[in-house]
Each structure stands twice: as C-alpha cells, then as structure tokens.
Amino acid sequence: MKIKIVSFLALLVLLGFLFIMVIPSEQGWNIHEIGKPLRNPDVFKDPEGSKYDHVKTMDDYFLRNGQRETGSNNIVTSVVFDYRGFDTLGESTVLFLTMSSIYMLFYQLLRKKKYCVVFTPGLHKGKSRIVFYSAVFLFPLILTYGFYLILHGHLSPGGGFQGGAVAASGVALSLIGSSFSLDPTKTRKALALVEAIVLVLIVTLGLSGLSSSFLFNFLATPDSFLNSVELGFTGSDLTSGGILPLYSLGEGIQVFCGMSIILIMFFIIGRET
Amino acid sequence: MNLVSVVFMILSILIVLGAVVSLLLKDLLASSVVFSALSLVLTVVFFLLDAPDVAIAEASVGAALTTVIFVISVKVTKRREE
C-alpha cells in the first residue's frame, strides 16, 4: 500500500515536471526548442580575416562560447556537464539502474546469514603481506586523488565519472587487501541511500534552473554572485563554473557509491562461495 | 618518422596483440590479466592522443574495476574455458 502511494506520488511529480517544462518565461508558453542555443552566439571576431567569423558547426560554438557561457576553463567538462548535461544525467541513471539490478539479483543470496559476516582487518592466512600493507598505504592516497579529480573537474582534465571511478578502484584495493573492517550489510545500505539521495539532488539542481531550461547553468549568468571570478588561463578558481562543480560533485559521489556497492557485493559472493 | 610516432605504432601493435591473446587464451584468469595490461597500454595511447580525461577513465575502469570483477567471477565459476 505504502509503495503504491509512493509510486503514485513519483508519477505525479514526473507529470508535473512535464507540465512545468512548457512554461519558459522568455518566449511565451512554448517548449524550448531542443538544440537551439539559449543566447545569441556573440561570435569572437578573428583578426586574421573573415574565415572564422560565424559559427558553422556545434563544436565551433562550444570552443568559442563555452568558457564565457559556462564559466569553466575545461571545455570538455563544460560540454559534458552543461551543454550535454541531460545526457550525463541519463548516464548516471543507467549506473543507478545497473546497481539496482545487481542488488536485486543477489538480494535473496545476500540475506543469508553467512554473507553478513563483518570483514576483519589484518593479515589473514593465505593473504599477501605486500598487498595488505600497500593497500593500507595507498587507499587514502587513491581516495584523495579521486576526490581531487571530482572537485577540479571544471579546471583540469577529469570530472565526476573519472574521479568516482578512481576512488572506487581504491575501495577495490582495500577490499582485496582486507585492510579495513567492514560490515557488508550496513555499508551496502548506507551507500545505496547516499546514491539515491544524490541522484535526487542532481535532479533538483536541474529543476532549479528551470526559468530557462532544465539543467540551465543559472549560477554562471552575469548577474550571479559567483560570476565575479576572472576567466581565462589564470582564472582557475574552484568557485567558477556556476553549477558545474556541484553537478560534478554529485555525479562523482554517485559513481563512487554505485561502483563500490557493485564491488562489495561481488567481493562478498566471491569470498563466501 | 619521429620518436612519438614510432612509440605510437609499437603501442598500437601491442594493443592488437593483447586483444588477440586475451581472446585465444583458455585460462580465463590469465586472459583477464592480459586484458588489464591491454587497458594500461590503451591508457598511454589515449594520453598520447591528447585525451587525458579518457585516459583517466580507462585506467580506473578498464585496468582496475573490470579486472577485479573478472577475477572474482573466474573465482566463483570455472577457471578454464572448455
């Protein structure tokens, strides 16, 4: 009964979201045309000649206007999280679905008592000493590097997906080395909860720019309080980029949690069989 | 022919060889290890092609996570292909 009510509410929210999409304020009561740029491309004039004076293709548009429109120094991230932000949302939804299906596949198996054993840290019989100590030493470093990649996604190569995957590989190393104590059931539940909440937060972030369009970078507009940062090669400030760092952080946490859940489940099954 | 293109050709040949070897090996554990090595070489190739984003993703997903999942699956099922 409860589940029915919750799913009905979710359906209602989705339908309401579809209705809200019809009301962008600028061009009246129409749905925004897909693929049409929101602002007029104010094209950078080339002093050499008129060869590059107008935008012909979409990548030309990205390269000329990306840094100014999104406030991010890394053009790849500005495409991934801003211009093609909806695709990235679909990607993270696919990852969430993969995690859920693996959860469902192993659910009956993991409810048995022998799979609920807490992992104890230490040098077990048949474990390599080198792997154990290198896992203890490397796990914090890999985790730090992963979150560095996530936080600096709009400034340097990297971003949400890459950083999350790197951090999850650190989790894999610590699982193999059995260097930390871990309650599989509790960790699984906590990570799943965090992942679901973060996915909802990403959608909320997209909905809050709805005055123009879904996932509009509303913090990078000229009158925003975060846009006082100087752009260019020297403008490498963590607060630049509007909603890009937030979206990247959410995506990174999501990828990290999803991959960690998959790894922990596979590891429990592989250890006990 | 400069040094970078020579290195690039060697790495490309290594990738193709690694793919063929990991397909032909009957020992699935060795096959997944070869696949992991292939991913590492592919990371270097992506970096030489000026795509550091893809290189990081390939190194973490292809070389680390996929190998772990493959090794656990081999451990649970059978080691040798029939």
Image: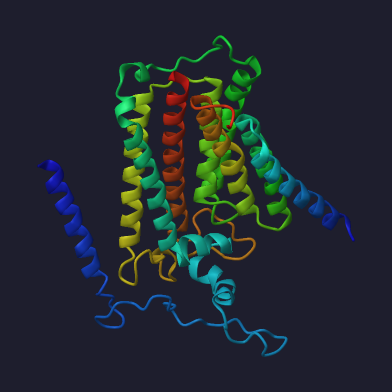
Q: Residue furthest left?
A: A1
Q: Residue furthest top?
A: A125
Q: Which residue lies furthest to the right in this view?
A: B1
Q: Quadrant of residue B26?
A: top right
User: Where residue B40 appears, x then y in whole percent?
Assistant: 68, 42
Above or below, A226 against A135 in this view is below
Residue A144 falls left or right of residue B34: left
Rendered residue at 47%/24% (across/down): A270
User: Where residue A72 appears, x then y in whole percent?
Assistant: 54, 62
- Of the 4 image quadrants, the one containing the N terminus of chain A is top left
Rendered residue at 55%/40% (across/down): A166
Above or below, B62 against A86 in this view is above
User: Where residue B17 appears, x then y in whole percent?
Assistant: 74, 45
Q: Nearer the viewer, residue A114 or A199?
A: A114
Is residue A81 visible in this depiction of the protein?
yes
Rendered residue at 67%/84% (across/down): A46
Is residue A143 visible in this depiction of the protein?
no
Rendered residue at 34%/70% (across/down): A213
